[in-house]
Image (cartoon, rainbow, N blue to C red):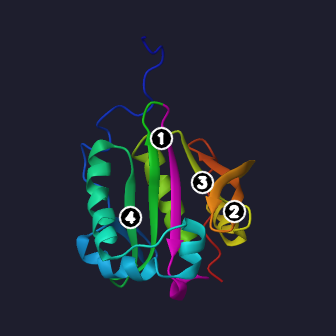
Amino acid sequence: MPVLVSPVVPDGRLSARPQPTLRVDELVMRPWLLSDVDAVVAAYDDAEIQRWHVRTMNRDEALAWLASWPDRWRSETGAGWAVTQDGVLVGRVGLRSIGLHEGTAEIAYWTIPAARGRNIATRATRAVSTWMFHHGGFHRIELRHSTANTHSCRVAEKAGFGYEATIRQGVLHLDGWHDMHLHARLASDRALPSLDRS
């Protein structure tokens, strides 16, 4: 059955170029490396990351997860960045899913305990989404988090992702079903002011 509208993002728009390294202030968002394995295992040992991302990772699982990201970039199904400061992993930002036809993606993030409270997730989320709009040609990027995760809600709002809806019992967590907030940012949304660094 023929599709009557052209893809918003043509096939190959991402995969034809290397995944970018992005910089904002002191942060560097770079593609994942296999050498990040120990830092990833340590991150997923954190109770808050386990609580909201509903997973842990041993070394073999972390290596497989890291190895999957270059393939996902080439197949244009996802993208992941290590967020670093002075070469040390402080967080993660990634596109869990990508839909080229409608130019959509879903973004996710975490920060390690020692890096929290410094707007790292906000700045990384804003930088990646801005790149996807300006260079990837995307139309809409969504963000979902548990309604109980008030920190993530603040990150979404500060990164310019407006609240749109509550998805009832959207994700199963260890303590049962969680309602999820849906936030989104459009390419046409107004430019964002600089973050208050105070």
Q: How far apart are marks 1 and 2 (CA)?
A: 34 Å
**Residue occupied by mark 4:** 81
**Rendered-image quadrant of the N terminus:** top left
Residue type at tag 3: Leu
Question: Residue most toward the top?
Answer: 1
What range is drawn magenta here? Answer: 102-118
Q: Which badge, 1 or 4, comes first in the chain's sequence?
A: 4
**Residue occupied by mark 1:** 138
- Of circles 1 and 4, the one toward us is 4
Position of 91 relative to 144 (above/below): below
Tell me, yes or no, if residue 176 can be seen here: yes
**Rendered-image quadrant of the C terminus:** bottom right
**Left or right placement of residue 12 versus residue 166 in this view:** left
Q: How far apart are marks 1 and 4 (CA)?
A: 18 Å
Q: Which of 10 and 96 is in front in this view?
A: 96
Residue type at tag 2: Gly
